[in-house]
Image (tube, rainbow, N blue to C red):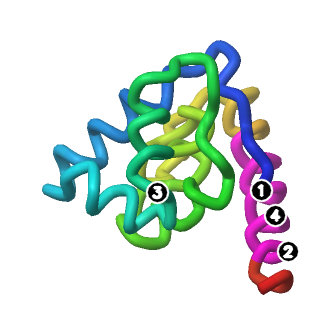
Amino acid sequence: MGITLAPHAFPQPYTRLRRVMRETGLNRSQLAEAAGATKATMTRYFTDGKRGMAAEHGFNLAKSTGFDAQWLLLGVGDPLGRDGDLPHPYAVIVRHLRVVIATVSQLAGESK
């Protein structure tokens, strides 16, 4: 059980996961393995538009694929973490979210 971030008004996780699959050549099984998720959980991410991706899975997938964890989890920012072109208010939000994500990631690493 971990922290789950709801997508709210952000694009659904499956749109981002499809892009990861397309750009990395991974299939759903390999994507699940890279995220540390079961195949059933990964299928749920593709089919259940009301739930966000578990933070742990987003962080694992970011480490495995090079995509930005914030983008994977929330659909905010650049897929590869290049946020220099974002308008000022969004860039500030992105910086704050990165601090939160780094803190959660660090705490998750300490709990293992």
Mark 4 touches mark 2? (CB < 8 Å): yes
Q: Position of residue 74 (x, y in %)?
A: 61, 35
The residue where tag 1 is placed is 1
Residue 53 lies left or right of residue 32; in this view the side is right
Give the residue drawn at x 37%, y 28%: 15
Q: CA distance from mark 4 to mark 1?
A: 14 Å
Q: Which residue in the structure is indicated by mark 2?
A: 107
Between the C-alphas of marks 3 and 1, the distance is 13 Å
Q: Residue at x 70, y 42 (%)?
A: 94
State the CA–CA distance, disc 3 to disc 2: 23 Å
Specify the segment rendered in magenta: 94-108
Residue 50: percent from left, percent from top: 61, 18
69 or 51, nearer to the observer: 51
Q: Does 107 lie within the magenta span?
A: yes
> Is mark 3 in CB contact (under 8 Å) with mark 2?
no
Query: Regarding mark 2 in the picture, which secondary structure is present there?
Result: helix
In terms of depth relative to the viewer, which is nearer, 36 or 13? 36
Quadrant in the picture for residue 58: bottom right
- Quarter in which the N terminus is drawn: bottom right
Discs 1/2, front: 1
Q: Which residue is mark 4?
A: 104
Q: Nearer the viewer, mark 4 or mark 3?
A: 3
Residue 29 part of the magenta segment: no
Residue that label 3 marks: 38
Kind of residue at disc 1:
Met
**Amino acid found under the numbered disc labelled 3:** Thr
Sequence-earlier tag: 1 or 2: 1
Callout 1 environment at 10 Å: few (<14), some (14 to 19), or many (20+)?
few
